[in-house]
Amino acid sequence: MTDSNPCRVDILLVEDDSGDVELTKEGLQAAKMLVTLHVVDDGEKALKFLRKEAPYTEAVRPDIVLLDLNMPRKNGQETLREIKSDPALRSIPVVVLTTSEAESDIVRCYDLGANCYITKPISFEAFTKVVSMIEEFWFTIVKMPSKEK
């Protein structure tokens, strides 16, 4: 990847807190790649997006999912379970990005197939740095499967 030809990535953010959505956007603004951030506010919408069901029939397959745990309708653990049990979706990396520091949540998410678990920092600077580090790790260091699956 060169600066004249930045990498293009699609990220699905599953987050019901508008403040955290804005912080995530801020963290991605300094990206070395062209990021398209798709946002849904609950697990039901996330699964419809991933499965290209109405109203998301034109949705793209994301390169990664950033998933909050505490959401209305279908929570993050239920959503994670469905993503990782679906053969068409399970290869999409899922990063749990949540306020929960509970050991039981951490263990459960890894048991369900989370690719990593990150506790959201409290401060603006720390939160945006974490988002930037997620991007750097997953799109610069890690070898990802093709989106064509």
Image (spheres, rainbow, N blue to C red):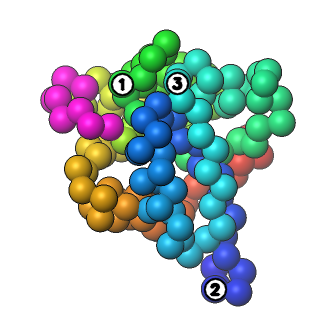
User: Which residue was labeled with disc 1?
Assistant: 70
Q: Is residue 60 left or right of residue 116?
A: right
Residue at image position (56%, 75%) is 32
Q: Secondary structure at mark 3?
A: loop
Depicted 90 relative to depicted 124: above or below: above
First along the sequence among labels 3 and 2? 2
User: Which residue was labeled with disc 3?
Assistant: 42
Front label number (1 vs 2)? 1
How many tags in the picture?
A: 3
Q: Which residues are magenta?
A: 98-105
Amino acid marked by disc 2: Asp
Q: Nearer the viewer, residue 142 or 22?
A: 22
User: Which residue was labeled with disc 2?
Assistant: 3
Corner quadrant of residue 119: top left
Residue 145 appears in view: no
Give the position of the N terminus as an image quadrant: bottom right
Amino acid marked by disc 1: Asn
Depicted 43 relative to depicted 33: above or below: above
Spatial separation of the CA atoms under disc 1 and disc 3: 9 Å
